[in-house]
Amino acid sequence: MKICITTDGKNLDSQIDARFGRCRYFLIYDTENGIVEAIENSNTQFSGGAGIQSGRLMVSKGVETVLTGNVGPNAFKVLEAAGIKVMTNVSGVVSEAIEKFKQGSLQQSSSPTAHSKFGAQGGV
């Protein structure tokens, strides 16, 4: 299973980024083989639509679950429509979040947790 973790860096020791659509990096982690792919988020440059584009990227990468701090309404719609589970209020180090996910201690979100344009211009 592929999961995506929003992060401020390129490795498992990086901190979770509280933003989905405007995070600095996406780490795609394959729970079956431990392979990690770091993707710089080019959607941060958009004044609008960053969440939608980031959601579409997750669909194209075959992600089944997203771990993040928050997700806005547009991104949530894209992810939900694709059947991608979203787990919010995730913080700390990426490797710890992955372990919590594997242990089943993270909660799936049933709705967005941030307003539209959350995190634009570096704000949260």
Image (cartoon, grey):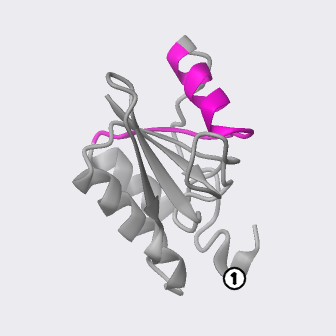
Q: Residue at x 68, y 54 (%)?
A: 18
Residue 95 falls in image quadrant: top right
Q: Position of residue 116 (x, y in %)?
A: 58, 70
Bounds of the magenta span?
A: 83-102
How many neighbours does mark 1 have within 10 angstroms: few (below 14), some (14-19), or many (20 or more)?
few
- Say left or right for 35 vs 124: left
Helix, strand or loop at disc 1? helix
Viewer-proximal residue, 34 or 43? 34
Quadrant of the image containing the N terminus: top left
Q: Residue at x 58, y 26 (%)?
A: 107
Q: Residue at x 76, y 74 (%)?
A: 123
Q: Position of residue 72 (x, y in %)?
A: 55, 60
Q: Which residue is mark 1?
A: 121
- Say left or right for 83 vs 103: left
- In reply to whether residue 86 is colored magenta, the answer given is yes
For residue 64, above or below residue 107: below
Viewer-proximal residue, 93 or 85? 93
Q: Position of residue 57 (x, y in %)?
A: 32, 60
- Say left or right for 112 vs 64: right
- Say left or right for 71 vs 86: right
- Amino acid tagged 1: Gln
User: Going by the picture, which residue comes out furthest to the top?
Assistant: 103
Q: Residue at x 70, y 47 (%)?
A: 15
